[in-house]
Amino acid sequence: MNYDFRLAEKALEKEFERVNDIRDFNQRKVLKAFFDNKVAPEHFYTVSGYGHDDLGREVLDKVFAQVFCAEKALVRIHFASGTHTLACALFGNLKYGDKLLSVAGAPYDTMQEVIGTAGDEETKRSSLIGNGVLYDEVPLVNGMDVDFAKLEEMVDEKTTMVLIQRSKGYSTRKSLSMQTIGRICNIVKAKNPDCICFVDNCYGEFVDKQEPLEAGADLVAGSLIKNPGGGIVEAGGYIAGKELLVERSANRLTAPGIGSEGGAMFNQHRLIFQGLFMAPSIVSEAVKGAILAAKVFEDIGFNSAPRYDEARTDIIQNIIFGKPEHLEEFCRTIQSLSPVNGYVTPIPEYIPGYEDQVIMAGGTFIEGSTIELSADGPMREPYVAYMQGGLNYAHVKICLEEIVKKL
């Protein structure tokens, strides 16, 4: 198929300008946090052993806290993944008899195992439900939108925490805008002012000018190998929000009595500082790539969400292929044009944390990084590819050019 990418880019100028405006706003915000906290070379060095009195770690936490408008932040390489980060926030703030409510249907597969609605018996034994936490979820309207009336009905004085998953995950629902998150928080607080509004912020950082804490959330968490790491941070996650809630999460990561005061950082300070500084620009490149993908796939006849001219709240682009062979071909093309392991052919397989086979294209410098160009999807109907990331727009465009030829 002959497809004119120059015409597509011409048609997207307005959308790209909007992305640039958000990028510039967020870059100023990050830069101000560096200035205000007097980041200096001595903050790039770490201590060993217990990790006590680590000045660089303390300043790093303060910079993240300012960027995300939080009372306190916990930025650590010890978080094994985004799921681990979220689990620390959940287990740290929920105890036996507390009630957790997911406001946008079921969360993604790995979180279902943390909660205890999926997985084998041993997994469920270690889950929130297995430890006596009560759980319920608000069903979506038509599988797409938050049911605000049902949410208001289900929140009561026994609801300890609501889980707000900003990104759609492996679903075809809409990702949640800041306006939607704000409305959710207002409804929850009106019914129960003491209820904790916790936002899974993965894939969403720096896509908008606002972050969830500014919209009324109490606690957010995310991964450093996604947006806020700028594509160079090797591991870790962050939790930010009200000081008490963050410190409770820290107690879960380390141990009661240690909390946020310990944990050697293994000379990763500079990378995390630098990754955060780069993040607004890197995220904007990924968003532009996703917008181009939305335009291209719509033009050649595939359903894709969000549309190229819709406001975005995360970096994920859905492409609905309807057939397993199209999903596999898409992922294999992405893999073949990746800078790492470009010679490898991905195949569907079972992955820990997921119920269905998943095919993944991820020729990334950081294993599992999703701010680098990657694509994946569960092998179940309607065979949706979830494309995310792109350290630079040109790489995404090159991949799309090849995919169009094959499809």
Image: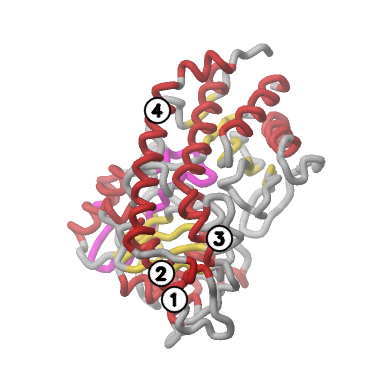
Residue on which disc 3 sits? 271
* Residue under the image location 62 percent in, 35 percent down: 383
Lateral position of residue 264 relative to residue 90, left or right: right
Is mark 1 in CB contact (under 8 Å) with mark 2? yes
Gap between marks 1 and 3 measured at Cα: 16 Å
Residue on which disc 4 sits? 17
Relative image position of residue 404 (x, y in whole percent): 66, 21
Tell which residue pokes out farthest to the front in this image: 41
The residues colored magenta run 152-175
Residue 110 sits in quarter: bottom right
Q: Quadrant of the N terminus?
A: top right
Give, as a three-letter code, the residue at label 4: Glu
Gap between marks 1 and 2 measured at Cα: 6 Å
Taking the image as drawn, is residue 23 in sight?
A: yes
In depth, the one of 354 and 305 nearer the eye is 305
As for residue 220 lying within the magenta part, the answer is no
Tell which residue pokes out farthest to the bottom in this image: 257
In depth, the one of 208 and 113 nearer the eye is 208
Taking the image as drawn, is residue 112 in sight?
A: no
Gap between marks 4 and 1 measured at Cα: 39 Å
Dot placed on the residue nearer the N-terminal end, 4 or 2: 4
Relative image position of residue 64 (x, y in whole percent): 39, 61
Residue on which disc 1 sits? 55
* Residue under the image location 41 percent in, 36 percent down: 312
